[in-house]
Image: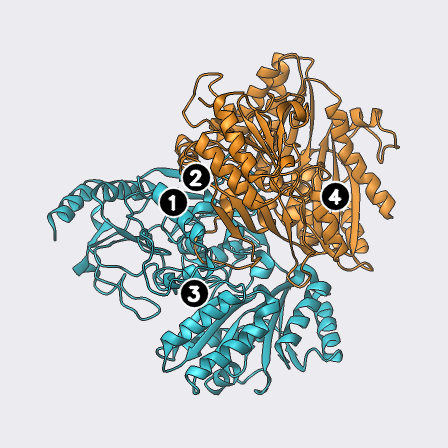
Chain colours: A cyan, B orange
Amino acid sequence: MSQKVAELLSRLEERLDRSAIVSAEEAGPRYREDPDGKAGAPPEFVLRPRTAGEVSDILRLCNEAGQRLVVQGGRTGLAGAARIEPGEAVLSLERMTAIETPDREAATIVAEAGAPLQMVQDAADSAGLLFGVDIGARGTATVGGNVATNAGGIRVLRYGMYRAQVLGLEAVLADGSILTSLKGLPKDNSGYDLNQLFIGSEGTLGVVTRACLRLHPKPATEINAFCALASLDAAIALLTLLRQKLGPLLSAYEVNFAPLYGAMVAGMDAPAPLPVGSPVYVLVEIQGQEPDRDGERFAAVLMQAVEDGVIDDVVVSQSPREFRALWAVREDANRFLFSIKGLVGVDVSIPLARIGTFLRETEAAVQAVDRNADIYVFGHLGDGNLHYQVRTVDPAAAYDIVYRGVAAAGGSVSAEHGIGLDKKEWLHLVRSDAEIATMRRLKAAFDPNNILNAGRVFDLAPATSIGDVSPQ
Amino acid sequence: MSQKVAELLSRLEERLDRSAIVSAEEAGPRYREDPDGKAGAPPEFVLRPRTAGEVSDILRLCNEAGQRLVVQGGRTGLAGAARIEPGEAVLSLERMTAIETPDREAATIVAEAGAPLQMVQDAADSAGLLFGVDIGARGTATVGGNVATNAGGIRVLRYGMYRAQVLGLEAVLADGSILTSLKGLPKDNSGYDLNQLFIGSEGTLGVVTRACLRLHPKPATEINAFCALASLDAAIALLTLLRQKLGPLLSAYEVNFAPLYGAMVAGMDAPAPLPVGSPVYVLVEIQGQEPDRDGERFAAVLMQAVEDGVIDDVVVSQSPREFRALWAVREDANRFLFSIKGLVGVDVSIPLARIGTFLRETEAAVQAVDRNADIYVFGHLGDGNLHYQVRTVDPAAAYDIVYRGVAAAGGSVSAEHGIGLDKKEWLHLVRSDAEIATMRRLKAAFDPNNILNAGRVFDLAPATSIGDVSPQ
């Protein structure tokens, strides 16, 4: 341990309780696991504050000492933002998991940053309300991480991204300043909305310690349907029809392209809801307030789509058990894909009108490099968000082809997972030099010593890599 | 004209066409009118660019010369942000009014900053879509001004504030950098969302030149009802009931407290929809997709509320003419209130649960100072947003009482109008020193020479002397 680190630790020990400071040896592999399988470096040490005041002390002292920190929530991120880089200490929010009782009249809840998403969902549910964001990692992913990555998931088309759920935050800046804005007012234009800075900036501008979140009326009805379709165009036509006929009743619209569905079904425990063989499958969900009527309305629109030749085959859930079973098929994509080692996986969004061309051209380009490459695509079609995977002998070429294709289609190289460490080499494909310079300007203003999640999203010094291509 | 201004003008003339530069004499009173009746100073000169490139040239040259600019859209703001301060030149977006044809499939529209709100609404309507924000000044207020103030209005409870409509912006920084982010992707987490910085920051961090805006399905049904109620508690109970029973069908919930309704009715051309005398009136609106059913559903809930004793009396619109007539009553509040000279008027938001206490205590405190004071309150109860007016011989005392009451109730001193020049003395009541210091930090990072809307929202140096506004 360096002299500098020893001095900092002794100052931290004056401020924090004994269990708040964990050495690298004590920590072991914990804090270093990464869902992508890339292990982080051993941390200098691990800090586990219990309050925003302690976070403030930690940041102030680390800032003075120039000690870099990586901020960790549930470590479920898929872009490496929470993976420990050499020389970093860990700031873990794992002991700040309190949530307040929801305010039913205002339809809000205040939760600490370390509380898992599912805890918020359950608390809302107990109060007869609904939290609008849901993602597969709900049991582990935390409020703070969800804010930092502006989490998306399966119901964005109904409730918006995580940003739309945030009514206020408490956040600590690198110099220890605590910004508290937890009034929960739906309308507040008294000065800059500083909360927005911390949403989606991946822990680089400050540490979120609490959030006041918006809740929604709990739906009385939840029904889903699984549909087989002949083409992407049919899936887009169905989406348009559902939006038109059902308006805000529509709460999810998930897509699964061949051959992914067939590959999943081969390894599934449960029977497949529909036969393998169609080019496209979609899972549609509605959430409504009229139990005696929503199902009828949903069935009528689906029936019309079948009659019009938009849907080839469809199964509609008739019970909560069937409802959960159809969702389990959707989530099974993750089981199947995580089981494949070395898979190229990207999370992109593309304007609906250009997805067809993107899929055709990208597949052709990938298979021109590796004719045996398998391509597995699923995602949130209602938001133009695709999770695109390639099993190939040439991952580097595949990444390059896919990301350049996305950029050419006017899309984003990260729809909902963020940039972290792992995607920053492609950021310049979709953000201009002026935009990246502005991000650096913000970083310098908020964290001049670059102690918070340094090197995530972008590097402070302009990249010098060969092949730097600026977007138009 | 100073030597410095003359030199700057000659540099601007090299870059801009002749009609883009207007002298103070040529401009006359235009650019100086203010809806509050407070005249602005004569401008040094007026700049009327046609493109983002011209805005960039203007900002770069003014930044180099230290020439302060006030950015103007439709000049309908109610906080003085666009009022000319001595020494300022005007940057008017009035010639940037182009709007693109809406993209029906993506449900988006791209509009230049100078386009009036109503032009966006009409374009959406022509494409079979709806723009989610509506405010009284729709014919004059512009897209750029709406972004800069994060406009609210009557349908926030259904569609959110203006922030929720913004999918992307083009903005120019003080140094002339152009940031363009107009892809219109509903999900994009590739680096910081810089758009958020410009929304609600009242032109102090950059000049918005274009926006990509979200559109919604056009409702097939629009029905409203005007209700008389016995108390604020009844109005809150009705809101809760409507939310529960109608979910997202509910699109507006406007309140009008006695004695305002009676005073308005006395001067109205049209007959009053309900007799004067109730303590509280609300205008409820629904927007739905089922013409053969929405009206029935709405009527059933209102009927239940009447039976339960929540509503004392109600009239429901039976035609588009009656629908417009009920909205005209709501908008008549502005006609009545603007006709009173020297009225104290504030735009605040307060948590629903604390509005009752706030109204009682504030009225008592105001009338303790001036027993003849009249208090007129209306607003967007669905968002906890009240427009609170006092006719009094002691306006200074009234402002102080109202704003301190709002702060004590955990509210905001500006729900939707912004802070501008006129409300900054009260900002500290609702934002901490750490928050205001962070706003200053952002301002210094984006506009180090303080040329853009200087002195709006907050002063750069704490408590500077009066009159310290003109550049050296």
**From mark 3 to mark 4, how far is it between C-alphas?**
40 Å
| Residue visible at 66% across and 52% down in the picture | B244
Up-down relation of residue A235 to residue A213 (above or below): below
Percent x, y of residue A467: 37, 65
Instruction: Return the x and y of residue B456 as percentages of the image width and height.
Output: 52, 29
Front residue of A433 and A283: A433
- Image-based side of A215 in relation to B36, left or right: left
Q: Position of residue A346 (x, y in %)?
A: 44, 70
Query: Is residue B459 rendered to the left or right of residue B263?
Result: left
| Residue at the spot of label 4 | B284
Expressed as whole percent of the image width and height from the top left, the position of residue A317 reads 62, 75
Per the image, label 1 sits on a secondary structure element best described as helix
Answer yes or no: do the residues labelled 1 and 3 have beta carbons within 8 Å?
Answer: no
Pointer 4 with pointer 2, Cβ within 8 A: no
Label 1 sits on residue: A441
For disc 4, the chain is B
Q: Tag 2: residue type?
A: Phe
Instruction: Indicate which disc residue A137 carries.
Output: 3
Q: As displayed, is residue A187 above or below residue B366?
A: below
Chain for disc number 1 = A
Identity of the residue drawn at 67% across and 53% down = B100
Marks 2 and 1, how far apart at CA: 8 Å
